[in-house]
Amino acid sequence: MKEIIDFLNKNKFGSLATCDGSKPDTRPFEVADISNQGLLFYVSSDSELCKQLKENPNISFCATDEKYDYAKVAGKISFSNKQEDKEKVLANSSFAKEVYKSGSTDKMEVFYLQHGEGMLHRHMDDKVICESF
């Protein structure tokens, strides 16, 4: 899993896929942090995305680099309401700092992908790594 994590640390922007009822839904997204707790993401509590995640907590996240190598992870997320997790988001995401520049994180929902399936595909050497985490 180390190669997949290293790739995501270097390429933290990608696409997050969720389900809107029975329809797939994707949007640009960011991995805010990666730790022993898993991959940390955040969302506004009043968003349609937050509603989707609470109805169906299964996600897939995919990030690509300039060589079209890509990593994807998928699994079931868990929400955290810990202030320390919100502080991790603000410490690691310049976008989150802009969104929550007032300092209030009341509407921030933090979620982790702690367990799931990961895959890294390196096109130049056609190397594919698949791991559970």
Image (spheres, rainbow, N blue to C red):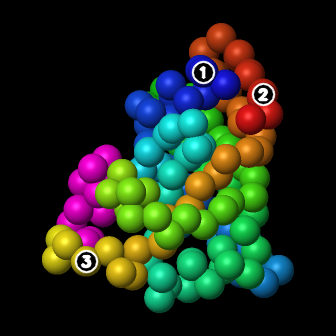
Residue 96 included in the magenta stretch of the image: yes
Quadrant occupied by the C terminus: top right
Kindly report the distance in space between the C-alpha atoms of the residues bearing marks 3 and 2.
39 Å
Kindly report the distance in space between the C-alpha atoms of the residues bearing marks 1 and 2.
11 Å
- Image quadrant in which you'd find residue 102: bottom left
Residue matched to label 2: 130
- Image quadrant in which you'd find residue 112: bottom right
Identified by mark 3, the residue type is Ser
Task: Name the element at disc 1.
Answer: helix
Asked whether residue 42 is in view, the answer is no
Identified by mark 2, the residue type is Cys
Vertical relation: 107 (above or below) 39: below
Point out the tag, 1 or 2, that comes first from the N-terminus.
Answer: 1
Task: Name the element at disc 2.
Answer: strand
Point out the tag, 1 or 3, that comes first from the N-terminus.
Answer: 1
Q: Residue at x 66, y 74 (%)?
A: 53
Kindly report the distance in space between the C-alpha atoms of the residues bearing marks 1 and 3.
34 Å
Please give the label number shown on residue 104: 3
Q: Residue at x 62, y 35 (%)?
A: 71
Identified by mark 1, the residue type is Lys
Q: Which residue reaches farthest top?
A: 125
Residue matched to label 1: 2
Which stretch appears magenta?
90-100
Which of the two marks, 3 or 2, is nearer to us in this view?
Answer: 3
Of 57 and 122, nearer the camera is: 57
